């Protein structure tokens, strides 16, 4: 969550209240879940067009801290998302350690380094083959 310095604590408190409500008084509804599924699947489809996303996905497959994650987590992404239920999400929330005594929170602050010149534009140097028409042209 991004907030102004003055509203940072209120934003943090609102996040904590939302998590508490999801766990106890206002559980995730089917409508919430279906809406979230659409957002996740649309974002996934868009991100699949970037090399950075593929690099992130592939490096995540090798992550020892995520057991049982392999190539199927990429190829079966749609099926996994579509199969999720509100019960799955409520169980996940219950396992996350969101009790006040277990919850870690932080308010970060963006600081610009001394001497930073904001309006200076750094131009990339041209690379071989990057002229008009690409590497295969004249």
Image: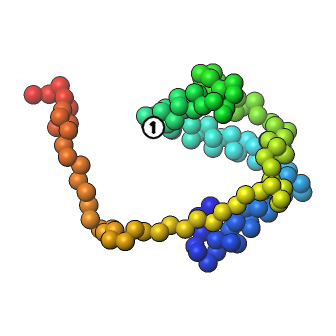
**Residue 95 x/y as whole percent:** 82, 43
**1 to 7, vertically: above or below:** above
**Residue 55 x/y as whole percent:** 48, 33
Foreground residue among 123 and 86: 123
Q: Is residue 78 visible?
A: no
Residue at image location 63% in from the left, 41% down from the top:
40
Residue at image location 76% in from the left, 61% down from the top:
16
Residue at image location 57% in from the left, 27% down from the top:
62
In the rendered view, does 75 fall on the left or right side of 84? Answer: left
Residue placed under numbered mark 1 in the picture:
52
**Quadrant of residue 66 in the image?**
top right
Residue at image location 79% in from the left, 63% down from the top:
17
In the rendered view, does 85 fall on the left or right side of 12? Answer: right
**Residue 88 x/y as whole percent:** 81, 37
Foreground residue among 12 and 78: 12
Q: Residues within 10 Å of mark 1 (few under 14, many from 20)?
A: few
């Amino acid at each position: 969550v991004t907030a102004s310095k003055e509203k940072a604590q209120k934003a943090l408190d609102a996040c904590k209240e939302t998590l508490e409500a999801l766990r106890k008084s206002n559980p995730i509804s089917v409508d919430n879940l279906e809406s979230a599924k659409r957002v996740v699947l649309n974002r996934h489809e868009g991100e699949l067009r970037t090399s950075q996303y593929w690099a992130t996905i592939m490096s995540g497959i090798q992550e020892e801290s995520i057991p049982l994650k392999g190539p199927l987590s990429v190829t079966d992404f749609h099926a996994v998302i579509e199969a999720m239920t509100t019960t799955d999400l409520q169980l996940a929330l219950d396992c996350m350690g969101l009790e006040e005594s277990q919850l870690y929170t932080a308010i970060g602050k963006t600081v610009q380094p001394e001497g930073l010149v904001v309006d200076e534009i750094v131009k990339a140097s041209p690379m071989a083959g990057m002229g008009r028409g690409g590497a295969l042209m004249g």
